[in-house]
Image (cartoon, rainbow, N blue to C red):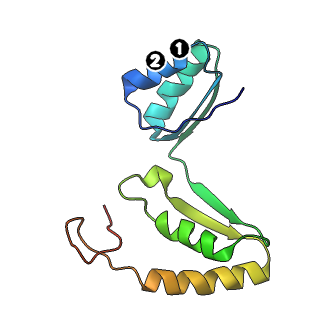
Amino acid sequence: MACSMSCRATRERSTRSCSIRVIAAVSFVGSTPIAQYIQSQGVLHGKRVQALGGAKNHAVVMPDADLDAATEAIARRLWFGWRRCMAFQFVVAVGQGTADGLIARLHKRVAALKVGAPEAAARTWDPW
């Protein structure tokens, strides 16, 4: 049986996760110092560890992708609030037709964003 869980974790929770016997692997995206800490704790407990410090996330859009769904996913992850580690820094569109369709949709979607403070009622996106 395999299970995947994503969560925001404190140092204590990360350490505990690395020591739980039934957890076989740990993946982390965030700051380099914390990635190094999680790597050391995971290895100490015999886990497979993927620790991406200062990571840059990529989105790959394949030719058979639903371009409307891909556009929405990319637009929502341009900044991802204050969690830069979860944002897409790079988008790779496979094939010229995919790229052209995606770029056209992204131009329209990004132009419709209303940037503002979190408490602003009219905003659709905030830079925090």
- Are circles 2 and 1 on residues that touch, CB within 8 Å? yes
Q: Give the x, y percent position of residue 93.
A: 71, 72
Mark 2 Cα shell of 10 Å, populated few (<14), some (14-19), many (≥20): few
Instruction: Using the numbered discs, state the Cα–Cα distance from disc 2 to disc 1 in whole angstroms.
Output: 5 Å
Amino acid at dot 1: Ser
Identity of the residue drawn at 48% across and 66% down: 76
Q: Is residue 81 above or below residue 67?
A: above
Q: Is residue 31 left or right of residue 89?
A: left
Q: In which quarter of the image is residue 12?
A: top left
Q: Is residue 12 left or right of residue 119?
A: right
Q: Give the x, y percent position of residue 60.
A: 69, 63
Query: Residue 19 versus residue 92: which sits nearer the camera?
Result: 19
Identity of the residue drawn at 62% across and 69% down: 70
Q: Give the x, y percent position of residue 114.
A: 33, 79
Q: Is mark 2 on a helix, strand or loop?
A: helix
User: For mark 1, what is the residue?
Assistant: 19
Q: Residue 16 carries which label?
A: 2
Amino acid at dot 2: Arg
Q: Residue 59 carries which label?
A: none
Q: Is mark 1 on a helix, strand or loop?
A: helix
Q: In this view, does 69 lie above or below 13?
A: below
Q: Give the x, y percent position of residue 121.
A: 22, 73
* Quadrant in the picture for the C terminus: bottom left
Q: Is residue 58 left or right of residue 80?
A: right
Mark 1 Cα shell of 10 Å, populated few (<14), some (14-19), many (≥20): some
Identity of the residue drawn at 78% across and 82% down: 96
Count the numbered circles shown: 2
Q: Is residue 108 above or below residue 117?
A: below
Q: Which residue lies furthest to the left in this view?
A: 119
Identity of the residue drawn at 49% across and 58% down: 87
